[in-house]
Amino acid sequence: MRRLGLSLGIGLSIAFSAAVTAVHLAWGSGPDQAVTAAWIGLAFLAITVPLGCFFGVQYDKLRGWAERDTLTGACTRRFLQTGYPRLVAQADRRRKRMSVLLVDVNDFKAVNDTLGHAKGDELLRKLACGLMNASRHGEIVGRWGGDEFLLLCPYGDRSALEALNRAISEQIAGISAQWNRPLSVSVGTAVYPDDGRVLDELVQAADRGMYADKHRRKEVVQQRLKA
């Protein structure tokens, strides 16, 4: 995340000090006017730059808390909602499609029940990290709620989505190996504008696909148990 607040704080401090110096030069008098104005400007810099840095850093912290989920480090739901129109506008300009992926941890409740909520939180952090590692082409990864994550993808072609799904599967396999426990996720995909034009419509379509994927996985497990 860019440190916008810090940059603004320093920039405003310098601009204010320069303005004070210019005013003194314009209205001051005496043979040492320029030297005096320079010293006054430096004095204001010494005061305003630390203040600008302090308030700029505080602004960046607040902005970071608004944009990043405190548990997982993924983007917040609000950030996804505000970032979606920008991706749509980009897709419309390029006359291309974009897509969303909804990712849900299978049997996450069992992790909390058997290993505890601390381990469940750790799994969510690892999953968020894995999703971000799998996203290498401008995707935005955010926590949609609970154990669900939403990816905003600036593309909608099938081959790119399949490649992303493979990358996610590789990350999940790595997490599963680290935990020495079988883990899996269900994924649903929706494409703009085919499946909807507003984010809620796309999420609903992706949610249906995600639950269909979850149902297929359960059927596979049941068939293996019967065999």
Image (cartoon, rainbow, N blue to C red):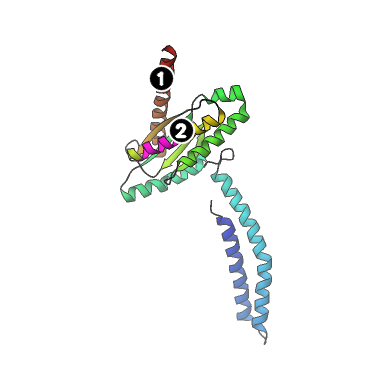
Which residues fall within the magenta stretch?
A: 160-170
Dominant secondary structure, magenta = helix
Image location of residue 182, percent across then percent down? 51, 25
Image location of residue 168, percent across then percent down? 45, 35
Image location of residue 189, percent across then percent down? 38, 34
Number of numbered discs on residues: 2
**Marks 2 and 1 in Cβ contact (< 8 Å):** no
Q: Which amino acid does label 1 sit on?
A: Val
Q: Which mark is residue 203?
A: none
Vertical position of residue 181 compared to residue 47: above or below: above
Looking at the picture, tell me which residue is in the foreground, 210 or 116: 116
Q: Note whether residue 146 is visible.
A: no
Residue tagged by mark 1? 220
Sequence-first tag of 2 and 1: 2
Looking at the picture, tell me which residue is in the foreground, 121 or 13: 121
Q: How crowded is mark 2: few (under 14 residues within 10 Å), some or many (20 or more)?
A: many
Magenta segment includes 166:
yes
Local secondary structure at mark 2: strand
Q: Horizontally, is 106 left or right of 6 in the view?
A: left
Magenta segment includes 120:
no
Vertical position of residue 103 compared to residue 39: above or below: above
Q: Which residue is drawn at 52% across and 37% down?
A: 128
Image location of residue 156, percent across then percent down? 35, 41
Vertical position of residue 145 compared to residue 42: above or below: above
Q: Residue at x 32, y 50 (%)?
A: 94
Task: Report which quarter residue 56 is drawn in.
Answer: bottom right
Task: Report which quarter residue 114 is drawn in.
Answer: top right
Residue tagged by mark 2? 103
